[in-house]
Image (spheres, helix red, strand yellow):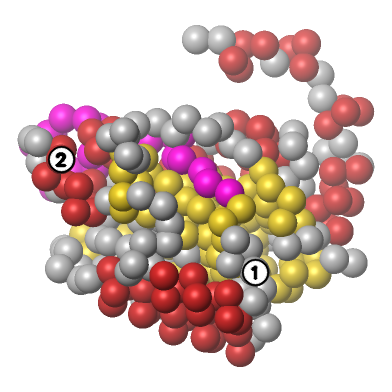
Amino acid sequence: SRIINVGAAQLGPIAPEESRVSAVNRMIELLKQAKDRGVKLVVFPELALTTFFPRYYEEDISRMDHHFERGDMPTPETRPLFEKAKEYGIGFYLGYAELTEDGHRFNTSILVDDTGRIVGKYRKVHLPGHAEYDGKRPWQHLEKRYFEPGDLGFPVWRSMGGIMGMCICNDRRWPETYRVMSLKGVEIVMLGYNTPDVNTSAPEPNHLRMFHNHLVMQASAYQNSCFVVATAKAGIEDGCMLIGGSCIVQPSGEMVALASTVGDELITYACDLDLAKMGKETVFNFAKHRRIEHYGIITEQ
Ligand code: CDT
């Protein structure tokens, strides 16, 4: 067996006026808990340093730039998180808004290994929501306004004894996300999310938000024989409720850890990566069983 102790470090709401320093201190507190529980890899949420700002409209998108990180990680405000994680020997996934030197904006996550080295970067591919102000919604979901679709694809990285992949929030609803990574052998898919408890684009009972959250990740973990470690930013942010439900799913599709609050909370599980290998060598042995001659339409317009 190849066991890696993994944590999903859920964050409660981050108010619009809350500083990055405060958000980082909250994450460091969760890291301390992770260390006490023998965790080696922690997943933090999407856009973990700020409030979920795509709910606000600005005509001039540069007026949102204070929510973005410029230049290389770690920034001065995030450096204490990197240092603490390195001291504890814990790797982590961190989501943040990225503004590149040449002016591109992405919804990004990075993977930092247990020695403090940044081993991977991912930029969100499936941006949900809309680009223009929508007066019919109680609040906006303007990811298509503030971010460009990710340009890095779905890489995987050999790190910390496993094959690691990342995606972000809405990506988890798309089977291609997992399949592309699992074709590269992914064993742990990490993701952070900010999911409002109301679907403002169509009438839908609120309870379906949590159902769909777990449905897609459990089905995808099974169909791709991988672990999924999913971490919410949860609770009421400036009047907008974000679902919790952070969880760890094993390759059988079973949920093996589940958050019980909508606040700062660490959940953990000892993931045996050989469980992922088993599925990849049997039912989901892609080389043996896929019938790609029938799949062509998937990559056509
Ligand atoms: N952050 C994010 O991607 N949230 C979406 C909300 C979908 S409704 C616009 C999600 O998939 O949870």
First in sequence, mark 1 or 2: give its number: 2
Separation (CA) of disc 1 from disc 2: 35 Å
Q: Is residue 68 shown left or right of residue 294?
A: left
Which region shows up in magenta?
Answer: 120-142
Image location (x, y in percent) of residue 25: 36, 80
Within the magenta stretch, is there residue 139? Answer: yes
The residue tagged 2 is 62
Q: Residue at x 74, y 34 (%)?
A: 183
Is the magenta region chiefly helix, strand or loop?
loop
Q: Which residue lies furthest to the bottom in this view?
A: 36
Q: Which residue is drawn at 44% across and 80% down?
A: 28
Image location (x, y in percent) of residue 18: 20, 71
For the residue labelled by badge 2, is the local secondary structure a helix, a strand or a loop?
helix
Q: Is residue 38 shown left or right of residue 212?
A: right
Q: Which amino acid does label 2 sit on?
A: Ser
Q: In which quarter of the image is residue 181?
A: top right
Is there any visible trace of residue 244 in the rendered image?
yes
Q: Residue at x 60, y 31 (%)?
A: 176
